[in-house]
Amino acid sequence: MKIVVAEEAGFCFGVKRALKLINEYLRKGNQIQTFGPLIHNIPVLNDLSARGVRSVSSVEEIAKGKTLCIRTHGIHRDIEKTLRRKGIDTLDATCPLVKKEQKIIARLQAQKEKILIVGDKNHPEIIAAQSYAKRVAIVNSLAEAEALPTRKELCVVAQTTLNTEFFQAVIAILLAKTEKLTIFNTICQATKDRQQAVRKLAPKVDAIIVVGSKISSNTKKLFHIAREKNKNTFQIETCADLRQRAILAKIAKFKSIGITAGASTSPQELDRVKNFLQKL
Ligand code: SF4
């Protein structure tokens, strides 16, 4: 069986940076908690948990004396203000590219612009990003974009992990509805590169394995993009999932398999999947 790993796959710059920050902090003997799971990767979270890092979901749960790590997606401004007011020490691991998106929204708000975010309103990144404006509209489907009223002026910002082709399709709809449309393409380079790589790889192999969490936004996008190009697309969280009989029976018949991985998937996990497939 021929195994091909996508040219760009796995850990992105923001995730590597967050892990480096938290590991350095732990090495110094500090105690830390994270606001929500640091990244969508079970083996990494298990490792952090074994080293005493617990995830909390509210300010009330933060243990006294422990630092709170803000994850790559950022945090709602109200929560940030509460943390400051309560004097809770923080380690900010917000990805600089998410920060850039937040700064753009804050600047547009200061200029009293009409803001539209294209992304998932329930995703932590967008929950945090939208808090930088008093009022934003959020769309996450072509139908929602079509339903928007016509406007003289509109500024549009993208979730960093958005499907690039979907963003282009939304922009095409908005152009027909707006006299002056200002576009901030805040999709991050890691997302663009991983999507581009899987678009290239998927038609050239018999099947695609997407490695990453089912709740990871960028992994979900990779899965959908791969699926559009290759109907034999499977998503697994870790190599252990490959051992399931149902998946094994499906993939064993293929002569070539491509592998891609979400931005929270470690190179070690990617290697485990590659080695397992090579032995089939
Ligand atoms: S996917 Fe992009 S925006 Fe998100 S953490 Fe990685 S580099 Fe940053």
Image (cartoon, grey):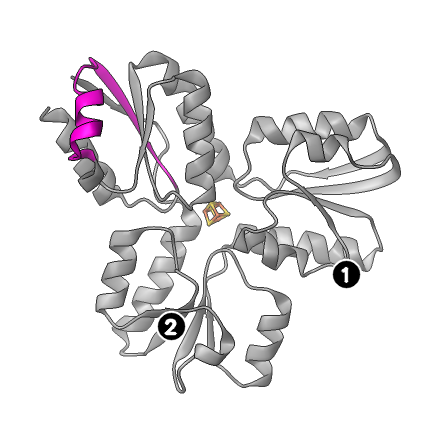
Look at mark 2 in the image and give the residue it sits on.
33
| Residue 178 seen in the figure | yes
158 versus 5 height, above or below: below
Identify the residue at horizontal 75%, vertical 30% (top origin): 146
- Location of mark 1 (residue): 134
Quarter of the image for residue 175 reads top right
Q: Secondary structure at mark 1?
A: loop
**Residue 89 visible in the picture:** no
The reply to whether the magenta stretch includes residue 114 is no
**Quadrant in which the N terminus is drawn:** top left
Q: Are marks 2 and 1 in contact (CB under 8 Å)?
A: no
| Residue 24 against residue 67 in the figure, above or below | above
Find the magenta span and give its range.
Answer: 242-262
Total labels: the figure holds 2
Image quarter (top left, top right, bottom left or bottom right) of the C terminus: top left
Q: Would the CB of label 2 be found within 8 Å of ligand 1?
A: no
Would residue 124 be found to the left or right of residue 242 on screen? right
Task: Report if residue 257 lies within the magenta region.
Answer: yes
- The secondary structure type at the circle numbered 2 is strand
Q: Is residue 261 left or right of residue 134?
A: left
Out of 12 and 80, give the one closest to the viewer.
80
